[in-house]
Image (cartoon, coloured by chain):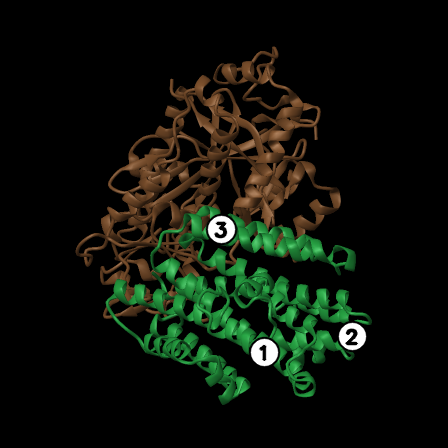
Chain colours: A brown, B green
Amino acid sequence: MGNTPLAFDEMMNADQGPRQPYENYHDWYEGQDRARLIAKSRDAENLFRKTGITFAVYGHEDSSEKLIPFDIIPRIISGREWRRLAQGIEQRVIALNAFLDDIYHKQEIIKAGRIPRELIERNEAFLPQMIGFKPPGGVYTHIVGTDIVRTGEDQFYVLEDNARTPSGVSYMLENRETMMQMFPELFHINKVRPVEDYPKLLRQSLASLAPPGCSGKPRVAVLTPGIFNSAYYEHAFLADMMGVELVEGSDLRVVDGKVKMRTTRGYEAIDVLYRRVDDDFLDPLTFRPDSALGIPGIMDVYRAGNITIANAPGTGISDDKAIYSYMPEIVEFYTGRKAMLENVPTWRCSEEDSLKYVLEHLEELVVKEVHGSGGYGMLVGPTASKKECAAFAEKLKARPANYIAQPTLSLSTVPILVNKGIAPRHVDLRPYVLVSDKVQIIPGGLTRVALKEGSLVVNSSQGGGTKDTWVLED
Amino acid sequence: MLGRTANGLYWMFRYIERGENIARLIDAGLRMALTRSGSSDEDWDGVLQSAGVREDFDAVHGKLTSADAIDYLLRDRSNPSSVMSCIESARNNARMVRTALTRETWEATNECWINFKDMLAKRVRPAEMPEVIDGIKRCTGLIRGAFHGTMLRDDIYNFSRIGTFIERADNTARILDVKYYVLLPAIAKVGSSLDNMQWESILRSVSAHRSYSWVYDGDYSSTNISDFLILNDRMPRSLAYSYDKIVSNLGYLAKLYGDNHAAHETASATLMLLRSRTIDDIMEQGLHEFIEEFIVHNNRLGEEISEGYRFYR
């Protein structure tokens, strides 16, 4: 694959000098002993292992707990670049909430003919149970993680809007913690905007959206599927940092019209539930009857205004990959302005012309399942073999509506530390957004990096790593 | 606090205690094999009995050999009381109650698991045994140290302590019961002059061979040893000491929550019994009967605690 040398590098200019945001870092780096950096890198890994910052990879029996590799070279974003991103993200998140409110109420966007009705109503992520119901404060997506990629000095694209239960924020926090412990001097020579008040802001944001039935100080809890879930570490971490209970479905039950948790002194009510359990599993009485992870009857309590569920059930319809291709229309429809952040051009394989184009250009495209996530079930045309492409074409023809396709973007690179020094690797960025009566965007986020040379797949389940992400104060 | 969290803390500390005790039992067994000419597999029969896994062992292994017994006690995952199983269960419980633990306590527990997962991945060669046993004691010591040094003295602490001492009382009672049986024929035969090695092995399995000498002037007798392990309230592994701790921790919970449960009554009654009896009373009643009854009461207390504090649904 030949596009690596052509990719935009965020640290180094074509003339081999550092780009402006990296100037101080680059100076510092030049004065470092490589052996020491490699040793530090190993220290970081031990630190992560000891702390138990692990994730589970499904389907790997003996590797049930893995570390996400951490690279010690930060990804640095200038204040100017960030302001532009933040404005675009805010616009997009506001549009997402307006869209959700609309499709569960008047459905004006459908009536205006901007989105096909069947795309919404035949979508599994659309929950008829939410029709006509307004969640507390009118907020659907309390926590959003917007995936952004960069291809040039001024070219950013939104790759995905994670509006259900975006994960990875614990890595944002732990990566920063680790960097501050290992290289305190770097934080003297760079003014890096802090990310560590995220848990506090999250708690405040959640508490401010307590349901109408809550009297007194709102009680917040994090709902986890349990210790065998791939993101369990993060669930425990967030509950711990916020100072709230970490509950499982079996701890909760509906008593007297409230969701209550079983404590050592009896049942106590919860007002706001930050759930890290999918919609399907939330309430066996309403959704999947075989779910052991949920709370029977919680949807009734929700509709009666006695609990806030974050994010609201049914938000998945807004980050569905089939809906994604309509985001420019959605943003314009609800904000009255053109989207500040661009979408990646997307072919909907459900449309005959698009399907034809996609099949003819499979070797240049990335094809994704509409409902997939985590990098599973996708085809990266340029790196796939002829045989893989042919096999994928068959799947595509069998269920075209199940796929979308996008051009292979030449993602920007940031160097990682390797044995011989530094080497560029492709990255993406997931900033985290909190929505209450205001939209708060944490200056930073999770930078995922493809550790394999030339690879464009940054997902941790596919061998990606992470970097600390700095937004500079300037 | 969630009932499930209380349950997780209670079991986390029961498993840490159990893992450490099993390691000590193995240590005592090895020691006996070393110091006696022609070590016999019978010694391991007693060790397996003390660990409460004699029958389960038979279900897995046909014949009793010392190598198999050690392996079963140390690292067999089909044995829920093997050291490896205990460390893993303790760590799983710790993960579940992660938000209730200080970072230090969690990390000590997690590191213990990381170390022994590798160290016990395959059979341990006899030459490596001392290092492994030492390592286990050091690891559990670190967990205990981190726990005592950093945890708030609140209900989290109380449930953890209660788990520790219910397990400890159970373990000490079992060791005494089994060993006493092993020793009994010898007592009958030769009166009070006994195989010193046997006595020493009991004391070693509760890490008390030195302290015993300080208290009883090095005079080994069944009465003194029973007194030490049952009634001596300065001996940190005795039944009396364990119950003193259980009662005081339950007392803190009652004060904090403002209510009493059946568990409070049961624990206090047992402590009163241990304080009011003399060792001669107990020997007269029959040591075996006394211990059997104690273990039943101890188990019931565990159930009453889990019910009173809503460990389960």
Q: Is residue B84 rendered to the left or right of residue B294?
A: right
Q: Chain of mark 3?
A: B
Q: Is residue A116 visible?
A: no
- At label 1, counting other C-alpha atoms closer than 10 Å, the crowd grade (few under 14, some 14-19, many 20 or more) is some
Image coordinates of residue A98 in percent, x first then y, are 30, 43
Determine the CA span between mark 1 and mark 3: 33 Å
Mark 1 on the same chain as mark 3 = yes
Image coordinates of residue B1 in percent, x first then y, are 34, 60
Image coordinates of residue B279 in percent, x first then y, are 48, 80
Quarter of the figure that contains the C terminus of chain A: top left
Kindly give the residue lying farthest to the right in the view shown.
B38
Determine the CA span between mark 3 and mark 2: 37 Å
> Could you say whether the residue bearing mark 2 is in a helix, strand or loop?
loop
Quarter of the figure that contains the N terminus of chain A: top right
Q: Is residue A160 above or below residue B116?
A: above
| Residue B91 quadrant | bottom right
- Which amino acid lies under the numbered mark 1 shown in the image of this protein? Ser
Identify the mark at residue B222; answer none if there is no mark: 1
Which residue is depicted at the point 42% across and 48% down? B150
Q: Chain of mark 2?
A: B
Q: Is residue A133 above or below residue A323?
A: below
Q: To which residue does mark 2 refer?
A: B40
